[in-house]
Image: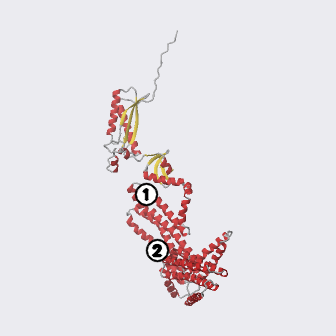
Amino acid sequence: MINIFKILLPFLICVLTFADNNQTTLVDIFENLKKVNAQIEILSADQNSSVDTKILNTKKSELLSKIPQFITKTDFSDADIKSFYAKKSALEKTLKNITNKQSQNYVKNAIELENLNINELFFKSIISLNELFKKGAKSSEIKAVLQDALIQSRTDLYVNLKELSQNVPDSLKDEFNELEISKKTSEDALNYLKENADLLASSYVASELIFHSSIDTINEKIGIKIDGVNFGKILLIIVIFAFFISLTRILARLTYALTLSFFDKTEHAKAIKDQILQIIKKPISSLLITYSLKICIGIAYYPTPMPLWVANTFSIVYIVLISWFVITILNGYGMLIIGKIAKKSGRKEVVNLILKIVYFIIFVISLLLILSRLGFDISAIIASLGIGGLAVAFAAKDIIANFFASVMLLFDNSFSQGDLISCGGIEGTIVEIGLRKTTIRSSDNALIFVPNSTLASDPIINWSRRKAGRMISLTIGLTYDSSKEALQKCISEINDMLLTHPEISRADNGGAFRGANHLKFKESIVCIDDLAGYKNAIYVSLDALNSSSIDISVICFTKTILRAEYIKIKEDVIFKIMDIVAKNGLDFAFPSQSLYVEKFTPKG
């Protein structure tokens, strides 16, 4: 906490000093804006002045961004207001006394009156905003005031200028052009404030917390006055910043206490809880520190609102931090909840894919919000995707193909995480199904990454989709001196042995479907045992007369589908078959050749 104070407090004090020493007025800003608009108007007719126009537009944006800082500083004395309205009233009377509306005198006075009307509308709107801010303005209230002013400017003032333009003599063209530029400048400023109403409202949290009276009280208690230094603001900033920094620890402990109800009191559960708290502590601390910085900067500028670029920067930081916090929560508490859902549903890969899609949606939403804060038109960006969609589709066709392949694989339920599959010469256990690729762990412990489009297009052998029945296929070769009776007895005893073996799959020992679920309704359409993954057939028969052996074929299925258990059962079956062969006086054949030597009798 001490390090944070060392880094951030000097920054806040610099902001405080800068905020208290701005000598510009809103009238100056308005006049400078008029000059820039006039210059842009002149250059707009010249096609070779695009660079100069760009520079002027940048200057205009800078001037507009300064307007909010002077809203609360704009104040007119009673004398100024009386003088303004007296001048306006005199002009209105003068115009009533002039019967010829096309005369130069009438037009000159009308231009002056309309200029007063434009100034009145603009500065009355600013004063109305000032009053709203003192009450703690909401963005909707700010927008309503500014919208009414813009409507009046674009209707009443527009009609007045339109009628006036028909009677303007050449000698007063320049004055009338200045009037139009003044109207445009007023609308530009009002529209800028309306577009940034949300940021303006957020800048006035200080007024809602009545910091003004607190600052004055502190300054009175201290009794020290130095030009350019506001001790009340400095002390309030230190206190508030220290409070929020200490609150991070309190909130972390509170979060730790609340998590007790979500976990068992075992050592394993406590370790998980500690890990989750360690994960979520950083985003919570970052959010609180950022919020405290915003309030402190708001105090430094109070009663003037902080610059819109500062408020906009905080808005972008909030978007990033909240996105980080949401993703962290999903990785912490959300992962535990999702893990429980996955266990109950049995479809871990679906939950995992949904989680990845949620991450992607959070990222996209955050990116769009940041772009909107940076001034980009989100509607235009989304619309442009339709125009450039074809190019994007060609560029990212593999990514799109893999994404839709992953969705198709999950809905087809071809395999799940943990299944042993073979596909396109690759065999291994499914580790994770991602948005683009599936991760497979091979039998020799290599990690294989397979694009989902490959899995969707190639045949897949799923060795794990078996409830009961892993095949044992043996060929027993016996010698040709075996009698028919011995062979028949051997075949019968092997068959009996398999029928009574407790680990060989049969319909009566768990080797057939016995459920009462929705698969029963398909019984008349498909073979339920094959659909559910049950095998229980036993085949023992004389198979072939080979060149050196009489072959008996043995085909059966183990109850287990696990490789380790399957190997043991197969071994036991082979030993029992060897005993039956020996018991019946038979011998196992092996490849052999007989050599016949013909007796040779020499002639003569």
Three-letter code for the amino acid on which mark 1 is drawn: Val
Label 1 sits on a secondary structure element that is helix
Q: Position of residue 486 (x, y in %)?
A: 34, 28
Q: Toward which corner of the image does residue 41 lie, by quadrant?
A: bottom right
Task: Nearest to the eye among marks 1 and 2: give it.
Answer: 1
Assess disc 1: are there few (<14), some (14-19) or many (≥20) residues with their C-alpha within 10 Å of its C-alpha: some
Three-letter code for the amino acid on which mark 2 is drawn: Leu
Residue 25 seen in the current view? no
Residue at the extreme top: 604
Residue 398 seen in the current view? yes
Q: Position of residue 396 (x, y in %)?
A: 55, 55
Q: How many marks?
A: 2
Q: Position of residue 170 (x, y in %)?
A: 67, 80
* 488 versus 25 height, above or below: above
> Depth check: 128 or 490 in front?
128
Q: Position of residue 528 (x, y in %)?
A: 35, 45
Of the image marks 1 and 2, the number of the one nearer the N terminus: 2
Assess disc 2: are there few (<14), some (14-19) or many (≥20) residues with their C-alpha within 10 Å of its C-alpha: some
> Depth check: 128 or 74 in front?
128
**Residue under label 2:** 247
Left or right of 589 in this view: 119: right
* 219 versus 316 height, above or below: below
**Residue under label 1:** 351
